[in-house]
Image: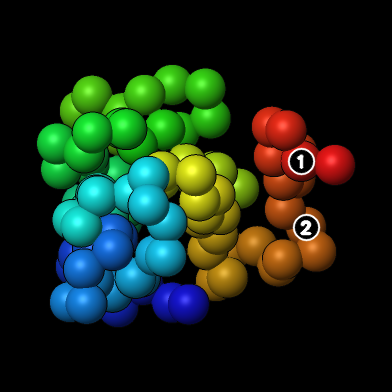
Amino acid sequence: MFLRGRTFLIGRAPECDLRLVDAYASRHHCLLEQAGDEWRVRDLGSRNGTWVGERRVTKPTPLAPGTVLRVGRTYVLYADPTTVGADELDVPPVPGAQ
């Protein structure tokens, strides 16, 4: 899925750009926002938090290609196809995955 526009809403609500089927995600969980040439993630007061790697998002946090977000129990990979191909990403393993 490609980011279009200047914002991208993630959550369970029908109006979200990325609608999750995840009971641990909030209706409006987090927002990806374009700030100049970069994208940032901002938690929208979710109960379970938004995580970048092992860090909970407490303020708008810049995203780099290969960044893994955790939204509820869902993992989302941020990649920029204009600068790196999917086969070039150094994607860390998902915790608890086998």
Residue 67 in the figure: left or right of residue 84:
left
Most distant residue in the right direction: 98
Query: Residue at (78%, 57%) from the top-left corner?
Result: 88
Most distant residue in the front direction: 23
The reply to whether residue 65 is visible in this rendering is no
Percent position (x, y) of residue 57?
31, 28
Q: Which mark is residue 88?
A: 2
Residue 37 in the figure: left or right of residue 80:
left
- Quick one: 39 or 43, which is closer to the camera? 43
- Label 2 – label 1 distance at C-alpha: 21 Å
Q: Quadrant of the C terminus?
A: top right
Q: Residues within 10 Å of mark 2 (few under 14, many from 20)?
A: few
Examine the rendered structure and indicate whether residue 27 appears above or below residue 63. Answer: below
Query: Residue at (65%, 62%) from the top-left corner?
Result: 84
Percent position (x, y) of residue 34?
23, 58
Residue assigned mark 1: 97
Query: Residue at (72%, 53%) from the top-left corner?
Result: 89
Examine the rendered structure and indicate whether residue 1 appears above or below residue 57. Answer: below
Percent position (x, y) of residue 25?
33, 49
Contact between marks 2 and 1 (CB within 8 A): the answer is no
